[in-house]
Image (tube, coloured by chain):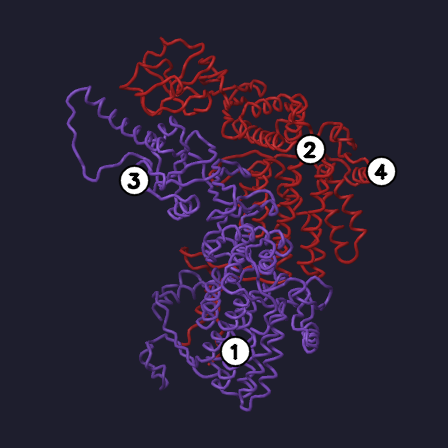
Amino acid sequence: MQPTPVILLKEGTDSSQGIPQLVSNINACQVIAEAVRTTLGPRGMDKLMVDARGKATISNDGATILKLLDVVHPAAKTLVDIARSQDAEVGDGTTSVTLLAAEFLRQLKPFVEESLHPQTIIRAFRTATNLAVSKIKEIAVSVKKDDKQEQRQLLEKCAATALNSKLIAGQKEFFSKMVVDAVMSLDELLSLKMIGIKKVQGGALEDSQLVSGVAFKKTFSYAGFEMQPKRYDNPKIALLNVELELKAEKDNAEVRVKSVEACGGSIQTSVGALTEDVLGLCEVFEEVQVGGERYNFFKGCPKAKTCTIILRGGAEQFTEETERSLHDAIMIVRRAIKNDSIVAGGGAIEMELSKYLRDYSRTIPGKQQLLIGAYAKALEIIPRQLCDNAGFDATNILNKLRAKHAQGGMWYGVDINNEDIADNFAAFVWEPSIVRINALTAASEAACLILSVDETIKNPRSGADAPPGRGRGRGRPHAH
Amino acid sequence: MALHIPKAPGFAQMLKDGAKHFSGLEEAVFRNIRACKELSQTTRTAYGPNGMNKMVINHLEKLFVTNDAATILRELEVQHPAAKMIVMASHMQEQEVGDGTNFVLVFAGALLEMAEELLRMGLSVSEVIEGYEQACKKALEILPDCVCSSAKNLHDVNEAASFIRTAVMSKQYGNEDFFANLIAQACVSIFPESGSFNVDNVRVCKIPGCGVTASSVLHGMVFKKEAEGDVTSVKDAKIAVFSCPFDCMVTETKGTVLINNAKELMNFSKGEEDLMESQVKAIKDAGASVVVTGGKVADMALHYANKYKLMVVRLNSKWDLRRLCKTVGAVALPRITAPTPDEMGHCDNVYVAEVGDTQVVVFKHEKEDGAISTVVIRGSTDNLMDDIERAVDDGVNTFKVLVRDKRLVPGGGATEIELAKQITSYGESCPGLEQYSIKKFADAFEALPRALAENSGVKGNELISKLYAAHHEGNKNTGFDIEGEGPAVKDMLKAGILDPYLVKHWGIRMATNAAVTVLRVDQIIMAKPAGGPKTPKQRGHWDKDGWDEEPDHFDTH
């Protein structure tokens, strides 16, 4: 009898192992990064994606793109995960985090191929990340919270920097003001849900407006509503969760609202017990034509902790992308309120960290020196990509930047407008330091995770029909 | 067709068509050994701090990135019957002590590898087994002598952290100090003076975002939920817990109500409203400020809860509800009634917080004597957080084991080498043929420091000779220095790398049992897998034949 091969695992199980496996994981991550590479920065390009149902999305938000790509490669999925995590934690910088992670891996590939032990690399990277994070904390500039004026200015700058790289960069002043106003009107929890964004097609971007209160499309009206006045001053509002059919006629505003916090009222399920304190107040209630829709507005609520942004714009995809951009900016402003320290963007902070780590690496012996050097080199990807996307000579600009940073120009970064370098701190290209800290930690955690894997074992999917091929045992031709 | 062919006389004749039958050394024993070896090769590279992770995609297409042997094996779905026995041993180890699963696998694999050599040398299976059993007994006798330290005060966070560190190190190398500290805090705070420790009381809550170093521990519980009503924060809260939905009672039997006029109709629903209001009011009057419910929250009930400024939290899991009861000291009420003061729980701070972009409800105790503590894990990817959760699990289990038995043995391969040394000399004093197998048993111990070394890119042989040299000089605690360059050794006791005694004790026992059981098998009989004419279908695939040919295959078969 011929020796039967030993079947250890379930039929159809696929496993691959060793350094080639590691390298192939790294390559997969490069591919993912390629997809978002060109979207970085003010001169980044947008991507148009059409999903399975034929829905088109235009975006340059890293997280959105990666989500739509529907990645199945297990290692590359990690990159999607960190983009999502960055989105969750700070809301912006999703492209940077993906790029950084991929660049870390790219710099490490030669070391892996020379069979340096991955754990050594991981240790070096953890050290480098810790150093980089503490360096950011050290050099970040904090803005006094007590000074409302100054804080507001800081917030607007941060919002403007975030919007810089988006589709609506042209209107960044307009929108950064709006975003800051919106966030400032919230309570201390800064709940994102309390900012509503409504999209109405038509009109120009500048026609967008911020309503301190609630606005919604008029959905429903009673017969005879034409008789009702279109505007109430200082109404009291009963917020009802029930049909106003049988029990009607006690109330003064005939609307059903779910946004309770707006007016400081509470949702009432019963009309039985209407007391003064459950009724909401606002200054003006009116019905207004916005584009092709009738909108109801509640404005100037005294207890208001909410606001609504009404976006106007041409195509549907355009308003959707605007909404995503505003979401990023809002998140950035919220983070900036919670952590009031900032750094300069435009590659400045990355260059400074790169210089710091390179200097540090020269003081230590052994393999760690090379690895931390690689980390420092990888950080340069951000300014480099900014230049590439803008069509500048990246090598030239990077040389200038390195020279400047070596001379102590801590905040020098890429000047997109003049194809040169500039003090980005003075140019008000500001970002909350937490964005960078999170990006660095997430990117290096992802790189370490991918490096630490030396074997992939894939079980066949259960339920579905048996996978083709590789039927080792049973696939053998029968003896009889 | 097959029926007409006369079969070779023997065992196969008695079986149904298609069954497989293997017997004897060559066919059964060596095959089994080979399968187990293959399995332990897979997990061997995951052993120790420098072990590599495995990416396992299970049959539901969920991705795991881990070096926890128990998880790898669970998701692998090992099919080979002999290899399954080793997997079972590893599971038993997990249930018994919660850590050291990889130890069992690697050691059992090494034992079987050695057994193969012995069998090829000409020893009989029973001699090998006898030798292994004797050696195992001896090893367990020697093990208490290896104890180098014991936990004095498990209520001391620093001391506990130093013991947990080793277990965490093998999962999260580089972050071990940070996590060991977190786990120690979590464990110590819920470790009562009476000395009974329940692993279940350390909860884990994973929230994506930020970095692993942003993880924290708090006394009390964290739920990924939002408050239902308007009240989002209560200090010094009195908590009423209901296991039923927060709604008015639904009658068991159906009833019919006859309504004669409009007034009665209005009063009908009004009566219901009034009842609800009085119930909520009663709860409020009893002093409660937070209501936790296990079921749905009715709109009406929520309305009154808002009116009376009650915070309402809804938990879906029955277990979560029970744990919360334990944390705050409440009694879960099966129906909506006003709780007595005894039935209400107390918590210093109940609030909704935003972590990352996840809303969580936090029940927090200010002082450190809550019944439950929660480790909030942050991390950039889900896989990473899952892996940290497993590290926390191992750490907590280590603490539990230490509560049971305070003794500690040196880690980093020191114990194994010491055992190997002593068992070798014991083997030499044995007269019979089992001498060989006892010595091989000792050799099998070398597999562990060897795996540690090879995973760190160090030559195994160099390290082992160094370790033996040190142990012969009487330095019982010398083990592999993972941070050193090349095959460096150092004193594990001084370095604080210690394993609980019980982990090693059970590990050796389980591994030996599993190895012996695998060796005892000399016949394998596999029934034909059920499932009808699957084979030809597969064959069609495998041969890359056209699908049209398929029916022919069926007919001729």
Closer to us: A240 or A70: A240
| Mark 1 vs mark 2: in front | 1
Q: What chain is tagged by disc 2?
A: A
Is there any visible trace of residue A98 in the rendered image?
Answer: yes
Q: Is residue B331 above or below residue A342?
A: below
Residue A173 placement, left or right of A264: right
Pointer 3: what residue?
A: B335
In space, the residues marked 4 and 3 are separated at their CA atoms by 73 Å
In space, the residues marked 1 and 4 are separated at their CA atoms by 68 Å
| Mark 1 vs mark 4: in front | 1
Pointer 4: what residue?
A: A407
Amino acid type of the residue that numbered disc 4 sits on in the rendered structure? Gln
- State the count of labels: 4
- Mark 1, other Cα within 10 Å: few <14 / some 14–19 / many ≥20: many
Instruction: Give coordinates of residue B16: x percent, y percent.
Output: 32, 76
Quadrant including the C terminus of chain B: bottom left
Are the two marked residues, 1 and 2, in contact with CB atoms closer than 8 angstroms? no
In this rendering, do the residues under marks 1 and 4 share a single chain? Answer: no
In space, the residues marked 1 and 3 are separated at their CA atoms by 57 Å
What residue is shown at x 33% (from left), y 36% (from top)? B246
- Mark 3, other Cα within 10 Å: few <14 / some 14–19 / many ≥20: some
Closer to us: A372 or B557: A372
Are the two marked residues, 4 and 3, in contact with CB atoms closer than 8 angstroms? no
Instruction: Give coordinates of residue B231: x percent, y percent.
Output: 44, 30
Closer to us: A417 or A261: A261
Q: Which mark is residue A340?
A: none
Chain A visual colour: red
What residue is shown at x 46% (from left), y 15% (from top)? A282
Q: What chain is tagged by disc 4?
A: A
Q: Which chain is purple?
A: B
| Label 2: which secondary element | strand
In space, the residues marked 2 and 3 are separated at their CA atoms by 53 Å
